[in-house]
Image (cartoon, rainbow, N blue to C red):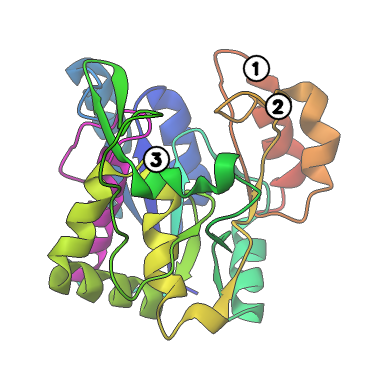
Amino acid sequence: MELAYIISAYKYPEQLIRLILRLTSDKATFFVHVDKKTCSEVHEQMVNGTKHLPNVYFLKRYRCDWGDFGHVRATMEGIHETIQRKISFDYAILLTGQDYPIKTIDQIEAFLQQHNGKSFMAHFPLPSDQWENGGLERVTNWHVRMFHRHYVFPKKGAVFIKRKFPKGFQPFGGSSYWCLTRDCIEYIYRFIQMNSRFVGFFRYVDVPDEIFFQTILMNSPFAGSIVSDDCRYIEWKDPNSGSPSILDIGDYEKIANSPKLFARKFDASVDTKVLDLIDGEILACG
């Protein structure tokens, strides 16, 4: 089972290197996107810390502000490189630099082999009660982020023409991260090349990385092969927070008992002991 990992990172070079070293094998390839806002010193640490590994590629860098199109652009760059470099892979897995495996490489490969042909991406049709106001305002309104501010048009009560979703497509939402078969990745690659207007529409969608890939694949011939599961263990200790909770040593038992393949998110500056325990107890046989 050959795997391609697309990793989005912007800080903590030691943690990124640790993640890659934990997942590296002769059947794994890594495509790392480093946020363009990240300073050159941190970027160089990431590159220098992995340059001894022949299976690590650093992608063209884009600015990735929370909620804007940069995250989609970075992932598209990773997909483009997996195809253009003619990398051999059965599955592509999208991670962040603050993810970490909670299953061994052998267990990850065995899981994907067991479900060969299935892709894993959390999804639900919009509107959905899982998102505020059903989530449709994220696509029917214009969303612009600049100067660290989020502008939405039309504002409540204003007369303004709402945006029409691309014709023929049902919008879907879900988690930003996924594990997709090569066939799905190739389909996305071709779709992007042939549908520039669809891609352009998402430049003004709110948090488009939670909608873009779901909408492409759930309106494709692959819809029936996609399991609504992102294979991540995540804690939302503050339901009003827009970001997952930092996992620490107090979460270890739940992590150890989880059937998921990966967990997020970790912050070694807050708690490195939980990563050490995962290495020593869960991944020791890997």
Q: Position of residue 163 (x, y in %)?
A: 28, 51
The image shows residue 82 at horizontal and vertical percentages of 26, 64
Q: Which residues are magenta?
A: 59-83
Q: Nearer the viewer, residue 91 or 122?
A: 122
Q: Compared with residue 270, is residue 164 higher up or lower down, i.e. above or below?
A: below
Q: Residue at x 53, y 50 (%)?
A: 175
To which quarter of the image does residue 52 belong? Answer: top left
Q: Who is closer to the viewer here, 70 or 11?
A: 70
Sequence order check, earlier mark of 1 and 3: 3
Q: Looking at the picture, which amino acid does disc 1 mark?
A: Asp
Q: Residue at x 71, y 34 (%)?
A: 235
Q: Are marks 1 and 2 in contact (CB under 8 Å)?
A: yes
Kindly report the distance in space between the C-alpha atoms of the residues bearing marks 2 and 3. Answer: 30 Å
Question: How many angstroms separate mark 1 from mark 2 (CA)?
Answer: 6 Å
The reply to whether dot 2 and dot 3 touch (C-beta < 8 Å) is no
Q: Which label sits on residue 274? A: 2
